[in-house]
Image (spheres, rainbow, N blue to C red):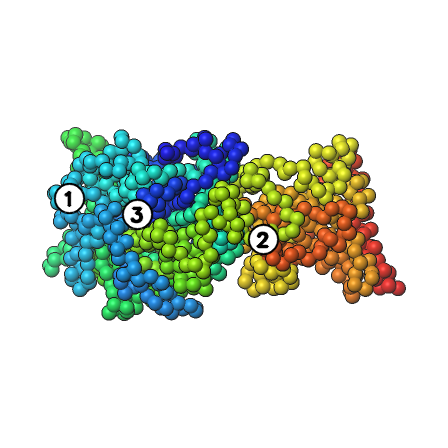
Amino acid sequence: MTLPGKYQQDDPSGPDSGGAPETVDAVVVGTGFGGSVAALRLAEAGKSVVVMERGKAYPPGSFARSPAEMGRNFWDPDRGLYGLFDAWTFRGTEGLVSSGLGGGSLIYANVLLRKDPKWFVKESPVPGGGYENWPFSYEDLEPFYKDAEDMLQPVPYPYRDTPKTMAMEASAAALGLAIKRPPIAVTFTTAPGAEPGTNQPLAAAPYGSVHGERAVRTTCTLCGECDLGCNSGAKNSLDHTYLSAAQRAGADLRTLHDVRGIRPLGGTGSGTGYEVRYVVHDPENPEAPLLERIIRCRHLILGAGTFGSNFLLLRNRASLPALSETLGSRFSGNGDLLTFVMGAKIHNEGKVPATRTLSGSRGPVITTAIRVPDTEDGGSGRGYYVEDAGYPAFMNWLIETGQLGRVVRRTARVAGQLLKDRLFEARRSNISADLAAALGDGSLSASSLPLLGMGRDVPDGVLSLQDGRLAVDWTLATSTGYFGRVRKTMADIAGELGGDFVDNPLWWAKRVITVHPIGGAPAGRNPAEGVVDSYGEVFGYPGMFVVDGAAMPGPVGANPSLTIAAFAERACRRLLEGARPAARGIAPESQHDGGPVTSVRDAPATSVREAPGAVVDSPAESLRLLAPDATKGKAAKPERPAAPKPAATTRGLAPGMAKADTDASATSVSFTEQMHGWFSPGQSDPAKGHALGRDRDRRIMFELTITAPDIDAFVADPLHRATAEGYVLADQFGGRMPVEQGWFKQFVTDTSPDARPARRMLYRLWLRDPGGTPLTFTGFKLIHNEAGLDSWADTTTLYATVVRGHVPPPDPGRPPAAEWAPPDPAAVAGSGILRIRPLDFARQLTTFRAVGPAPLPALASFGNFFLGELWKVYGNRVSRIRR
């Protein structure tokens, strides 16, 4: 069994194994409320389970508190940060999620409310088209809610003298609002039915702890630090519950394991299994290369959270081409809204208002929940909750010192008094009262309280990739009515408490911050409505499940953690019972594509048909050195193959082109070219792919450095062959893909339909998507003499097609036309048109380089060759124009 955070060196997927990939029954990605449930239930059933969590384990006492610790407590491996908080910013919203063993449970506010039965809406219209539809009901989840509650042991907040709790209950009563103390997953007593007490040691759970025997948990200390990680261990977070039980049942928990790629084994829909590609982070050596590793599984469970699971699916669409077109849709922030009550007061007639003590830092973060009904259950508009949102004690100091003017005035008065005493020899040696006056009475922090709203906002956001990074298109516009009602209720509460209602500063920028992102891979009744079915199984990919917030088809309304856990419990029951629709074509364990396979280990790693002649590489040959942080997209550090290509892949290179064969006496010429365009998957006609891609804003670009290692050989070669290095960036294929091997042929002789001289510039690039699926980018520029002077358009327009598989150039003995023959439509991944923009062309002219004994003659030779070939095509027309 793997210890948390420790990588087993004898793992067959390791860098030195040289053997077949590691194979297990199930791989679980992420340890939030979906992944942790799956880890336990599958391990209990006797499955071999590997759980991959990108973050670290956090035993009690290890969560950051000091400024120095907090400054490094964020997740950004690109900057050497491997901490707890993962912050995102998008159009219209900010997001904050967790990275660590236990996922979001490490920083959530512990509330485990069930989704309101009538909020499982059916075909509820969404502005802009479509509708929110929940393909499962409260009744479907009810027994699984109970299973999750039994494991997490939530209880209402038991203390009766907590100021913020009493204030919320009093204000709700005065306003006629329904309020309760929701179940929270925090331990307040040493035994059921005992009196609550703070900081009392807790007995070890019967299934032990992932943190080892020395990890000591105590009852809640009422410190308000739930959202920073519970150092007392009082939170019944997933590491203390589901994950500890899963490890006891045999699950292999691996921290700092970051999953990057997914592709099916044995073809789309076969049900044979999945290949998962990942890296292992080493915080002690952040500059070390990250070697891609491979593990194979029968069942793949995605529980990486809404952002994580959607990012994985979007990045691996080329390997998962049957994914529903609804991928990325129905995003919602679960209606999250953060506001503040500031300076609450008690107003007594005829008396000066007194400070109302709220003590926001006393108790767990959330102790009460006010529920405002929905139109579905007797209310008006979309329903929501308003909860008290406490904060850590150190925030009191920030609130007080944030009043800079008052701090300066108090300090100046005290300093003036002390100076006066010294000058006039006042006989006073005790200055305690002076120091107390300088600190102030702390009335603002004592009388202030955050409020957290959440509910049924409109799930019309869209998740996508932009230049390889995750993007969200969401605005307040369609949810203005919902947020207006939530703010009014919050303002009423502030007024009842005698305080000022203060918006989150982001509100004035028309932005909100969510800690409950929802949707993107919504459950639906069919692939036209959702990415997964009502049990979380991905349409078209048997055995792959999404069990986190991404699968929710709309806002949960209440705090979503319990509903996600119940959904995962139900999904696991379905998986283990094997009740799968026959129409999905799931093959038995021993079958693949109608023929026998010995195991998942032996199944072919291909998702769809590859182009004829594609080179088949082994898993070891396909490994890459990956960037520390894939979420950076185009800005991520470059990736590259882990090992050089075998010699056989140099087919099509001219003599002297291979770098190892380059003559030291030769002079090379190189230049860098950048092209941009539109591209559409599934299209084999570049013109149609371009038009459809432009309509749907599906962009593609590349940046290539073309090198002729020997300029004399290049000019003399009839095919004028050179190498191409660089990358292709296409969000439909997961973002930035480095060129593993590239061929370029300039001015290959051709003939136009009217028998006039023509030339083609040919591109062939071997790529690999994040899932490891090999792709070949082929393209040509057609240089031919049509009406008018069209040399600019001809030399800057590239007709591109991407086919599946690594397809070498045709044998040199075949006719040149074989290079641009239409590919097998079944193997085409997509097509489009790219062009050089004028500014990019200007930059390209500055990139020409010659290296060797004769650089200037080499550049002149290339220029003469280029212009000479153009003259052969366009010269006659130019001569006629002159005459």
Q: Is residue 743 above or below residue 143?
A: above
Can residue 36 be seen in the rendering of this structure? no
Estimate how packed mark 1 is, as few (under 14), some (14 to 19) or many (20 or more) residues with alpha carbons within 10 Å.
Answer: few
**Which label number is shown at residue 609?**
2
Q: What residue is shown at x 34% (from left), y 38% (from top)?
A: 250
Q: What residue is shown at x 42% (from left), y 61% (from top)?
A: 530
Label whose residue precedes the other's in the sequence (2 or 3): 3
Residue 814 image offset from top left, x and y in percent: 76, 49
Residue 587 image offset from top left, x and y in percent: 46, 52
Q: CA distance from mark 2 to mark 3?
A: 45 Å
Estimate how packed mark 2 is, as few (under 14), some (14 to 19) or many (20 or more) residues with alpha carbons within 10 Å.
Answer: some
Q: Mark 1 or mark 3, which is nearer to you?
A: 1
* Residue that mark 1 sits on: 192
Image quarter of the C terminus: bottom right
Can residue 162 be seen in the rendering of this structure? yes
Q: CA distance from mark 2 to mark 1?
A: 59 Å
- Kindly identify the amino acid type of the residue bearing the numbered disc 1: Pro
Q: What residue is shown at x 27% (from left), y 61% (from top)?
A: 139
**Which label number is shown at residue 637?**
none
Image quarter of the N terminus: top left
Viewer-closest of 638 and 262: 262
Task: Pick out the residue farthest to the right.
Answer: 883
Residue 476 image offset from top left, x and y in percent: 39, 62
- Kindly identify the amino acid type of the residue bearing the numbered disc 2: Arg
User: In what element is the residue under mark 1?
Assistant: loop
User: In what element is the residue under mark 3?
Assistant: loop
Q: Mark 2 or mark 1, which is nearer to you?
A: 2
In the rendered view, does 1 fall on the left or right side of 280?
left
**Which label number is shown at residue 108?**
3
Quadrant of the rendered image containing residue 400: top left
Quadrant of the rendered image containing residue 669: top right
- Kindly identify the amino acid type of the residue bearing the numbered disc 3: Tyr
